[in-house]
Amino acid sequence: MCSKCDSITIYKCHFTLRYYDKEGFFPNLERKGNIRYFSDNELEALRIIECLKKSGLEIKDIKQFFIWVSEGSASYEKRKELFEARKSAVETEIQELQKTLSLLKFKCWYYETAMKDGNEDTINAMLPDKLPKNIQKLYDKGHE
């Protein structure tokens, strides 16, 4: 299902939207019959929910964030600390994924070269520190 407001389209399963609504994430959501009308405020709430979910935060903790929002300026510090913690967690995950990507790229090169040569002898003779410069960087990053 697609929710649309002012040329901004966010694709969400209608079950997910209902769940978020039931959980109280949209306290000011306008309804007419069974139709929900999402304003810019609800769309921004969806963006924040998705951002925090992707950062690894659980729904119960996301609900806590929205409770803090309802408290106004008294909770600015708590909210900032939450975002700082999530930013740090995402940065750590990105570093780990970069290592993973480097090792995957190295192994692609490794097997491409082995297929060209018909064996792994030449590559193994270059390991661990006599690889071509660009490949050496991938190898080193993947083996940190």
Image (spheres, grey):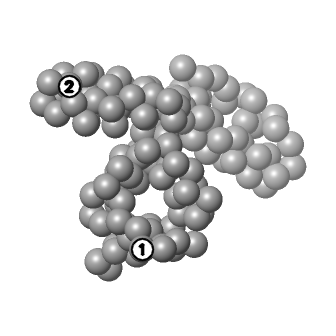
Give the residue at the far front of this rendering: 33
Please determine whether, in this image, residue 141 is positioned above or below residue 38.
Answer: above
Pointer 2 residue: 75
How far across and down, in percent of the image, does residue 79 sit? 26, 28
Give the position of the N terminus as an image quadrant: bottom right
Q: Given the image, on which type of amino acid does mark 1 rest? A: Lys
Which circle's residue, 1 or 2, is located before the other in the chain? 1
Which residue is found at the position 67% from the left and 47% from the top? 109
Which residue is found at the position 54% from the left and 20% from the top? 144
Q: Circle 1 sits in a helix, a strand or a loop, which is it?
A: strand
104 vs 83, left or right, is: right
Image quarter of residue 14: bottom right
Which residue is found at the position 51% from the left and 35% from the top? 59
How far across and down, in percent of the image, does residue 140 sit? 54, 26
Which residue is found at the position 61% from the left and 45% from the top? 105
Label 2: how many residues lie within 10 Å, few (<14), some (14-19) or many (20+)? Answer: some
12 vs 111, left or right, is: left
Work out whether residue 113 can be spotted.
no
Q: What label does residue 32 carry, if any?
A: 1
* Foreground: disc 1 or disc 2: 1
Q: Given the image, on which type of amino acid does mark 2 rest? A: Ser
Please determine whether, in this image, residue 133 is positioned above or below residue 1.
Answer: above
Work out whether residue 30 can be spotted.
yes
